Image (cartoon, grey):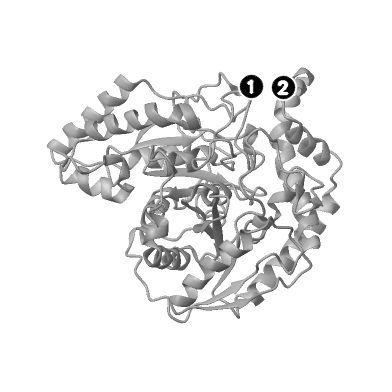
Amino acid sequence: MLHSSQNINEFGALDLSRALHTQQFSCRELMQATLAQLDRLNPGSHAVVSRVDSDALLAQADLRDAQLARGESMGWMHGIPQAIKDLANVQGLRTTLGSPLMKDFVASEDGLMAQRMKAAGAIVIGKTNTPEFGLGSHTFNEVFGPTRNAWDPSKSAGGSSGGAAVALAQRMLPVADGSDFMGSLRNPAGWNHVFGLRPSQGRVPMSPAQDVFMAQLATEGPMGRHVRDVAMLLSTQAGAHPSSPLSLKDDPAVFAGALDMDPQGHRIGWLGDLRGYLPMESGILAVCESALKSFSGMGCSVDEAALGMPPEQIWQAWLVWRQALVGPRIAPFLINPANRAHIKAEALWEYDQSLTLTGAQLMSASASRTRFYLSMLQLFEKFDVLAIPVAQVWPFDVSLRWPQNVAGRTMDTYHRWMEVVIYATLAGLPSISVPAGFGANGLPMGLALIGTPQGDWDLLKLAHAYEMANQDLIAKRPPGV
């Protein structure tokens, strides 16, 4: 059914959806191509884990074909293979969180994100790899080992949605879910030359969740090789839910609309390295500034911008918020003191730090976060979008736990090298990583665009305009793919 010159694995998710619904090829053929791509590339990159039996997947694909033959469709993801990040529950599959303590845990029911994607017709083929408890922007753990960068297997894939980003770049998945607390949808997207969107806080409700009132920094969201696929998956993931009382009530169907827009006159504020505050490895600013020239060529204005609050104050507020939210996630695993030997040092550090926090410290950090948010509102009086590099370092050696030095400066925590991503998170703003280009080392880098409060749709449209203006760059694929 498929023309010999066409490779199913090259199709984006929406193109796949159209092709399946017009019977250009079958769900079985798509599944066969996906499994073949996994067999060829996944052993080298280790992006997809806990794979479902191939015969069972082909049987599911046959059921989807039978539905289409009867004129029935479950939705736009009908028959499309998906692997869900290994922090989220999928019924019948292991949810390990990358932890040896969870390596045998099998979810008894789907989490909300998996529910919504399955309801749209997706077939879950496995999980995507993540660091232990999702902590640290480097995807390695003692359960499955490291996920290797799609462009250089000796380098880190980023994280914590590293498996998702590599599976996308290597054409093992057409679109993917992920989650983001400290850049986890953006950093791996930038390091693997794909798009990753951190939605506005509350846009994508998360369930089950340990807490639904205080935990306002992490969010699930979409990744893809094309902005239209990112937006379409967001339309499936988004939407208020009773279990998430702070979720946004906007109609998610808007994200399935046309993305075309005229970027002429858009005002972009370039944050860069925050006037020398953020250490950056050589070449990162240059690659990102080259990408910004593309926006200028599209009729946008690009001017230097500065945060309206000292960055070190923002960082100190961040530390309190992160420890207050991460510590309680680790606490249940330490009810048995013997488990401490099986939890990575970075997670133990977060937990131990959280034990000394007081309510007064958290309220002070919340007041700092409020001042920061208000200062961002002032910036958006001058700019429509803010831009900043998505990472401060290039993809590093996969055997390292984390960079201890960046551009000659010592990192005082395991995540200080990721400080560049906290601004969108702490302010609850949407942010998308777009492929910026490649360094002299041949490795990819991303540019993060930060949108106005709840301005996900406008941000996606600007990112789509950038993609259309840089199709040759976006089309570059990793070696061997």
> Residue 52 location, x and y as percent?
39, 23
Q: Eyeballing the image, is 88 above or below 230?
A: above
Residue 408 appears in view: yes
Neighbour tally class for label 2: few under 14, some 14-19, many 20 plus, Cα within 10 Å: few
Q: Secondary structure at mark 1?
A: helix
What residue type is disc 2 on? Answer: His
> Residue 80 location, x and y as percent?
31, 39
Task: Mark 2 and mark 1 in contact? Answer it, CB < 8 Å.
Answer: yes
Q: Label 2: which residue?
A: 342
Q: Residue at x 77, y 57 (%)?
A: 315
Q: Secondary structure at mark 2?
A: helix
| 22 to the left or right of 112 | left
Q: Residue at x 48, y 63 (%)?
A: 456
Q: Residue at x 26, y 41 (%)?
A: 7
Q: Nearer the viewer, residue 75 or 55?
A: 55
Q: Nearer the viewer, residue 214 or 414?
A: 414
Q: Residue at x 19, y 33 (%)?
A: 65
Residue 48 appears in view: no
Q: Label 1: which residue?
A: 100
Residue found at the very far front of the displayed protein: 440
Task: Tell me where residue 137 sits by quadrant.
Answer: top right
**Label 2 to label 1: alpha-carbon separation:** 7 Å
Q: Nearer the viewer, residue 187 or 457?
A: 187
What residue type is disc 1 on? Answer: Pro
In the rendered image, the quadrant that contains the N terminus is: top left
In the rendered image, the quadrant that contains the C terminus is: top left
Q: Nearer the viewer, residue 212 or 428?
A: 428
Chain-order first, disc 2 or disc 1: 1
